[in-house]
């Protein structure tokens, strides 16, 4: 305690050997109340050792939490990278290769590295790389969204509708991959800046690109709605009403069996239509936990830390 000469702390009525300290409410001026202070029963040398240890741990506290988040981000990017293998029959092989490269290099950047987190210059370089990956992901996403819109044409035949629906499968999967990657890159920016960049600022590009991608998704939904009406597709029954010459030929028989007025539609196609009509982009997670301090415990001149429960249900 540092006080002016001739002054002392006021005794607290809450217990023996307790003193009062003035408090104020967060974000407000003026006195809000008081705290009870208790002297530390330690020698000067012991206290110096402990406070020095605390100072050292506080210096790496943000690194501890940063490591937690980077491990989480890296794991999600690994899952995204694995999902790229499921994008089959994508004729735009060069574009797919570029997407794979961005995800792979973003994941490499998210591997926790003590040297990067301890050095301001190294962290700045890593942030610039994350920004470059974000820009590249945005460019690729714009290309994918343009290709998606090219598939949304009125079909002269039901087989054309099926073909365009199949064409959307790898494109929409690629869209999801890029959006998810941008999401993790925005989180990585917060960690690499040690929260100097706010989650809102880091996620600005992500939210903008998600908004444009959602518009494309709405176009896909409207296109499917129109096409299923034109071709009389019943998704629940996995069938569609016969049209043209097939309808004329089967019409007499439908008087005996109304079911003959319909023809079966492949289950795979039905699943594709349903999936493409319901896909939604992932929400940007809150990164407020990154500002939560690590809980410290000093015992027997040893310093322990624990990640707060707000991060994870399990103790660390």
Image (spheres, grey):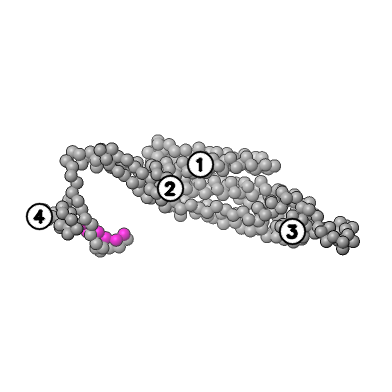
Measure the C-alpha gap from mark 2 to mark 4.
50 Å
Q: Residues within 10 Å of mark 2 (few under 14, many from 20)?
A: few
Q: Please say whether residue 24 is one of the residues in the magenta stretch.
A: yes
Sequence-first tag of 2 and 4: 4
Q: Secondary structure at mark 3?
A: strand
Q: Secondary structure at mark 1?
A: helix
Q: Residue at x 20, y 39 (%)?
A: 46
Measure the C-alpha gap from mark 3 to mark 2.
45 Å
Mark 2 or 1: the one toward you? 2
Q: Please say whether residue 260 is one of the residues in the magenta stretch.
A: no
Q: Position of residue 83 (x, y in %)?
A: 60, 42
Residue indicated by mark 4: 6
In this view of the protein, which residue sits in the foreground, 54 or 11?
11
Residue indicated by mark 1: 75
Mark 4 or 1: the one toward you? 1
Sequence-first tag of 1 and 3: 1
Q: Secondary structure at mark 2?
A: loop
Residue indicated by mark 3: 234
Query: Looking at the rendered structure, which numbered label has been put on residue 313?
Result: 2
In this view of the protein, which residue sits in the foreground, 41 or 155?
41
| Residue 106 seen in render | no
Q: Position of residue 67 (x, y in %)?
A: 42, 41
Q: Secondary structure at mark 4?
A: loop
Q: Residues within 10 Å of mark 1 (few under 14, many from 20)?
A: some
Quadrant in which the C terminus appears: top left
Mark 4 or 3: the one toward you? 3
The boundaries of the magenta stretch are: 21-26
Mark 1 or 3: the one toward you? 3
Look at the numbered discs 2 and 1 and tell me whether their residues touch, using CB distance below 8 Å.
Answer: no
């Amino acid at each position: 305690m540092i006080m002016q000469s001739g002054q002392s702390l006021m005794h607290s009525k809450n217990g023996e050997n307790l003193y009062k300290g003035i408090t104020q409410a967060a974000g407000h001026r003026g006195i809000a109340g008081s705290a009870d202070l208790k002297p530390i029963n330690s020698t000067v040398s012991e206290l110096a050792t402990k406070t020095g240890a605390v100072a050292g741990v506080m210096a790496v506290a943000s690194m501890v939490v940063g490591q937690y988040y980077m491990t989480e981000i890296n794991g999600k990017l690994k899952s995204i990278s694995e999902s790229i293998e499921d994008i089959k029959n994508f004729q735009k092989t060069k574009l797919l290769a570029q997407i794979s490269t961005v995800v792979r290099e973003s994941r490499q950047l998210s591997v926790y590295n003590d040297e990067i987190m301890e050095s301001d210059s190294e962290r700045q370089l890593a942030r610039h790389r994350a920004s470059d990956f974000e820009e590249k992901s945005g460019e690729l996403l714009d290309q994918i969204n343009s290709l998606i819109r090219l598939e949304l044409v009125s079909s002269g035949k039901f087989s054309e509708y099926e073909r365009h629906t199949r064409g959307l499968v790898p494109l929409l999967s690629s869209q999801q991959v890029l959006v998810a990657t941008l999401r993790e890159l925005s989180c990585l920016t917060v960690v690499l800046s040690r929260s100097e960049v706010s989650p809102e600022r880091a996620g600005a590009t992500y939210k903008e690109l998600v908004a444009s991608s959602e518009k494309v998704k709405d176009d896909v939904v409207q296109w499917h709605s129109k096409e299923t009406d034109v071709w009389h597709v019943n998704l629940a029954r996995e069938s569609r009403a016969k049209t043209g010459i097939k309808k004329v030929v089967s019409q007499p028989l439908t008087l005996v069996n109304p079911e003959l007025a319909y023809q079966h539609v492949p289950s795979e196609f039905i699943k594709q239509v349903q999936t493409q009509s319901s896909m939604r982009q992932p929400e940007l997670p809150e990164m407020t936990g990154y500002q939560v301090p690590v809980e410290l415990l000093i015992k027997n001149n040893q310093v322990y830390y624990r990640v707060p429960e707000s991060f994870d249900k399990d103790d660390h």
